[in-house]
Image: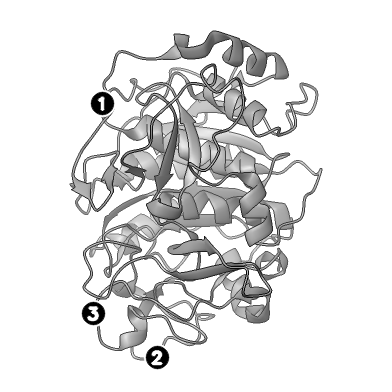
Amino acid sequence: MARTILAAAAAMALAGGSAGLAAAAPAAHSTGPGYHHACAVKHSATVASCLVLIENGIKQQTAAQLGGFAPTGDGYGRPTLVKAYALTSSSKVENVAVVDAYNDPNAVSDLATYRSSWNLPACNASTESGCLTVTNQNGAASPLPADSGSTGWATEESLDVDMVAAVCPHCHIFLVEANSASISDLGTAVNSAVSVLHAEAVSNSYGASDSSSDSTYDADYYNHSGVAVTASAGDDGYGVSYPAASQYVTAVGGTTLTKDTSVSRGWKETVWGHSYGGEGTGSGCSTFEAKPTWQTGSSGCSGRTDNDVASDANPNTGVAVYDTYDQGGWLKVGGTSVSSPTIAAIFALANSIKAGTYPSSYPYSHTSDLFDVTSGANGTCSPTYLCHARAGYDGPTGLGTPDGLAAFRS
């Protein structure tokens, strides 16, 4: 039977303290200003890298050390996301899949701890509401892939499931673990999430190089009408990555989300990145992908333009995540790996995906139901809207960030 979190698991996780810590040392790959990459940055047209960034200087603590409470001041949780994006709740159970590489053996207990610490509703064994099921890339309970070890992918998996639970507490989460970080294995996992697990939304928090193989990968793995397939835009500033470049997915960029009491919303967002590039959300014009018929406001790019929408991703305004396999418990993370599962969960929460349609088209019919991000940049480019925010559509943040659920309904 696939592994499923029950309410009792949350109590066990809290009681266990640091007992679940693995021997693998925390991954610490290339560093940036105030953060480091959880996974190796190297990727190609055939192999992807995860896109989670860990903020430096945050003391990682287990649930037991914090008395079973979520950390204060070290990363956003559900309360912030609900307020910043005007989210409403729903008791309807929707299936959301997150696709990652390798196995995180602590995924079930860690998510139970995350849910308990943020006072999210306990799992309901009869409906599996809000629970987590872990499968291999074929959608089966076993055999699961090799443990992630020091690759950093376990941190990615914790982030992905935590974000879905935070945004959509009653969603059923499928963690679909690919055998490796190759596009063929990850893509197989996407297919299984749709055809075997019947997920309404599928999040992909990883990126490979945009290449001439994109159309083949599209046909083989990412073209699923009637399903909200989301993909992270990348964390290296201006530039396109795959599968975010696919014309069939919702490309999700990243912002810097800060409290601002001077505006009615109470929050301010700018593009995550800098005009000199090198870090921040990805964006750009694909050389290999055709532009979707519904993509508007992106003149000067004959191909697919990234992105469609965006949400918080800056590690400095990142989220609190719980991981005891390759991290020390609570940590603060960012990257567009935050954005993709956030938007996937919002699509599920909106509960309005229609067969035969591509949900990436929905926001283009509901632009007034998004917060327009009009400042910030992630590099230098021409035309400038591909890397600089402006009123209306721009590359880094697409049409904007969620203002409720309406933009994500058919």
- Mark 1 vs mark 3: which is more N-terminal? 1
Q: Is residue 358 above or below residue 123?
A: below
| Element class at badge 2 | loop
| Element class at badge 3 | loop
In screen coordinates, is 150 left or right of 61? left
| Element class at badge 1 | loop
Residue at x 54%, y 48% (from the top left corner): 202
> Between marks 1 and 2, how big is the CA–CA gap?
43 Å
In screen coordinates, is 331 left or right of 39? right
Give the label on residue 150, or none. Answer: 1
The N terminus lies in which quarter of the figure? Answer: top right
x and y percentages locating residue 69 in the rendered image: 61, 27
Q: Which residue is mark 2?
A: 299
Q: Nearer the viewer, residue 114 or 107?
A: 114
How many other residues sit within 10 Å of disc 1, few (<14), some (14-19) or many (≥20)? some
x and y percentages locating residue 286 in the rendered image: 30, 73
In screen coordinates, is 32 left or right of 124? left
How many other residues sit within 10 Å of disc 3, few (<14), some (14-19) or many (≥20)? some
Is there any visible trace of residue 358 in the rendered image?
no
x and y percentages locating residue 179 in the rendered image: 34, 30
Residue at x 33%, y 66% (from the top left corner): 273
Q: Nearer the viewer, residue 3 or 233?
A: 233
Kindly indicate the quadrant of the structure image that contains residue 168. top right
